[in-house]
C-alpha cells in the first residue's frame, strides 16, 4: 500500500497584513501538517507548489521547511516538491530554493520540470509492501499568455511515457484548471487537456479544497491557512488543511485532514447590524484571536462615530480587523455596490475602460518593478503588458 500526504500552497514566509503573528501561524500549521501526516504513517509527502511565498524566502521559512522534511526523512519519508508561481524564479541564473534544498538534503526531492524530458526523467518511484507508485512533477509556468499551450505540449509527451509504465501514477502540478478559478483573468488549463493514464492528479494553485473525477481523481487540497478574505466562507464550509491519499485502491481514496487555523470572519451590513453581529462573534472563546473583515454601509458623517465604537468593541479581542466602508465616492463617480468586485484590477478596469486581464498585467508589472532589484527580473510581466498594449492604447485614445 502506498499512502501519500498531499499539501499545496503552504506560502511559508508570508506575513498576511504584515503581521508577524500571521507568518508564525503558517510555520505552526506546516509543522502540524507534517506531524499529522507522519501519524498517518504515510510513505511520501507531496507539496504541489508555492511552498514559499517568494523565491527569496526569509531564513525562518527555509529553516521551518528544512526541520520538517528532516523530521519526515528520519522516518524514511521523502518530500516531493514542484515550484509554484509565488516561489518561481524571477532572475536568470538564480537557483530555486527548493532545488538548493534538494541538494543539501536527500529528504527533499525536486521533481518539478518545465519540459517533457525533465518531467519524465525526474519521475520518482515509491515502493511499499509490493505496491508501486510513480510521481511525475510539473512546475508552474509564468502567467504568460501562451502558458496553456506549454502545458499541453508537455502533457502530450508525458502521456505517451506513462502508458509504458506499471504501477499507480500521480501527476504533481501547480496550475489553474478552467472553470475552477474564481475569476477568468488568467490563462487556465482545460481539464480535458490533462494527460490520461494517471490515477491521481495532485494539484496546487487553487486555495480552496476540491476533489473531482475525470480521467482520474483530481485533487486540490487548498492552502493550509486562510490567505485572503475570499477564502473565509469556504473555510467555514470545508475547513483548511491537506489530504491523505490512499493509492492502493482501484480509485484513489482522498481523506481530508483539518487543521486548527486562526479564525477569520466577514461581517457585512448596516452599522447597527455590524456592531451587533460582532458582539455575538466575540462572545465565543477562540484559541487564537480572530481576524475580522468588516463591510459596512455608512453616510459620510457617520464614519467617525462608527470607528470609535468599533475600536472600543474590538480592542484586545481581535488580532486585526479590515474595514471597508460603502458609500458614494465622487472621485470615481460610482457607488460601492454590495457584491460587486472591488479588487484593484476591477477598479482599474472600470475606471480606465480596459479588461481585467489587461489591468492585472499592469498591476503585476508594477508590483514586480517595485519589489525586484533589476528590471530584467520582470521579463515575463513586461511580456504580458506588451501583449495587451493595443487594448490599453485604444482605451487611452478613447478617453
Image (cartoon, helix red, strand yellow):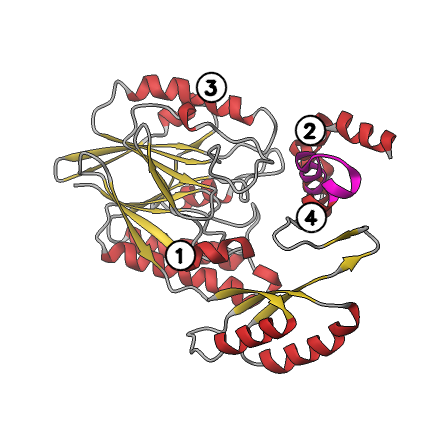
For marks 4 and 2, give the one nearer the viewer. Answer: 4
**CA separation, marks 4 and 1?**
27 Å
The x, y position of residue 383, in whole percent, is 69, 29
**CA separation, marks 2 and 1?**
39 Å
Query: In the drawing, what numbered circle is on residue 237?
Result: 1
The x, y position of residue 118, in whole percent, is 42, 25
Q: Is residue 372 visible?
A: no
The x, y position of residue 132, in whole percent, is 20, 33
**CA separation, marks 4 and 3?**
33 Å
**CA separation, marks 3 and 2?**
21 Å
Q: Earlier in the sequence, mark 2 or mark 1?
A: 1
Residue closer to the observer: 68 or 31: 31
**CA separation, marks 1 and 3?**
37 Å
For marks 1 and 3, give the one nearer the viewer. Answer: 1
Task: Describe residue 73's horizontal placement relative to residue 341 as left or right.
Answer: left
Query: In the drawing, what numbered circle is on residue 344?
Result: 4
Q: Is residue 66 visible?
A: yes
Which quadrant would residue 372 be assigned to in this image?
A: top right
Q: On screen, 360 above or below 313?
A: above
Task: Describe residue 260's horizontal placement relative to residue 187 as left or right.
Answer: left
Helix, strand or loop at label 2? It is helix
The residue beneath circle 3 is 153
Which quadrant would residue 129 be assigned to in this image?
A: top left
| Magenta region includes residue 128 | no
| Magenta region includes residue 358 | yes
The residue beneath circle 2 is 383
Q: Are marks 1 and 3 in contact (CB under 8 Å)?
A: no
Task: Describe residue 188's horizontal placement relative to residue 158 as left or right.
Answer: right
Disc 4: CA contacts within 10 A as few (<14), some (14-19) or many (>=20): few
Q: Earlier in the sequence, mark 4 or mark 3?
A: 3
Q: Residue at x 78, y 68 (%)?
A: 300
For marks 4 and 1, give the one nearer the viewer. Answer: 1
Amino acid at each position: 500500500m502506498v499512502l501519500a500526504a498531499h499539501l499545496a500552497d503552504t506560502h511559508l514566509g508570508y506575513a498576511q497584513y504584515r503581521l508577524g503573528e500571521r507568518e508564525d501561524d503558517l510555520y505552526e500549521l506546516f509543522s502540524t501538517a507534517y506531524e499529522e501526516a507522519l501519524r498517518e504513517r504515510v510513505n511520501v509527502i507531496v507539496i504541489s507548489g508555492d511552498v514559499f511565498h517568494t523565491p527569496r524566502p526569509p531564513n525562518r521559512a527555509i529553516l521551518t521547511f528544512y526541520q520538517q522534511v528532516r523530521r519526515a526523512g528520519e522516518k524514511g519519508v521523502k518530500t516531493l516538491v514542484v515550484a509554484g508561481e509565488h516561489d518561481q524564479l524571477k532572475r536568470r541564473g538564480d537557483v530555486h530554493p527548493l532545488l538548493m534544498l534538494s541538494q543539501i538534503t536527500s529528504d527533499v526531492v525536486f521533481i518539478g520540470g518545465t519540459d517533457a524530458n525533465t518531467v519524465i526523467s525526474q519521475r520518482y518511484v515509491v515502493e511499499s509492501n509490493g505496491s508501486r507508485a510513480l510521481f511525475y512533477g510539473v512546475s508552474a509556468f509564468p502567467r504568460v499568455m501562451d502558458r496553456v499551450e506549454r502545458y499541453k505540449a508537455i502533457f502530450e509527451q508525458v502521456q505517451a511515457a506513462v502508458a509504458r509504465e506499471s504501477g499507480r501514477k500521480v501527476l504533481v502540478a501547480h496550475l489553474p484548471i478552467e472553470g475552477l478559478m474564481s475569476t477568468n483573468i488568467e490563462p487556465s488549463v482545460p481539464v480535458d487537456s490533462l494527460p490520461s493514464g494517471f490515477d491521481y492528479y495532485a494539484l496546487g494553485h487553487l486555495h480552496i479544497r476540491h476533489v473531482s473525477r475525470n480521467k482520474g481523481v483530481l485533487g486540490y487540497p487548498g492552502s493550509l491557512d486562510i490567505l485572503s478574505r475570499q477564502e473565509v466562507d469556504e473555510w467555514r464550509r470545508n475547513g483548511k488543511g491537506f489530504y491523505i491519499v490512499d493509492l492502493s485502491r482501484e480509485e484513489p481514496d482522498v481523506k481530508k485532514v483539518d487543521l486548527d487555523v486562526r479564525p477569520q470572519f466577514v461581517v457585512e451590513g448596516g452599522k447597527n447590524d455590524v456592531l451587533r453581529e460582532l458582539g455575538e462573534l466575540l462572545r465565543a472563546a477562540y484559541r487564537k484571536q480572530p481576524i475580522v473583515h468588516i463591510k459596512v454601509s455608512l453616510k459620510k458623517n457617520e464614519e467617525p462615530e462608527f470607528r470609535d465604537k468599533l475600536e472600543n468593541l474590538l480592542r484586545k479581542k481581535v488580532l486585526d480587523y479590515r474595514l471597508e466602508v460603502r458609500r458614494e465616492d465622487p472621485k470615481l463617480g460610482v457607488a460601492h455596490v454590495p457584491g460587486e468586485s472591488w479588487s484593484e484590477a476591477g477598479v482599474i478596469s472600470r475606471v480606465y475602460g480596459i479588461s481585467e486581464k489587461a489591468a492585472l498585467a499592469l498591476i503585476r508589472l508594477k508590483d514586480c518593478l517595485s519589489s525586484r532589484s533589476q528590471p530584467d527580473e520582470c521579463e515575463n510581466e513586461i511580456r504580458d503588458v506588451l501583449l495587451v498594449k493595443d487594448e490599453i492604447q485604444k482605451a487611452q485614445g478613447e478617453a
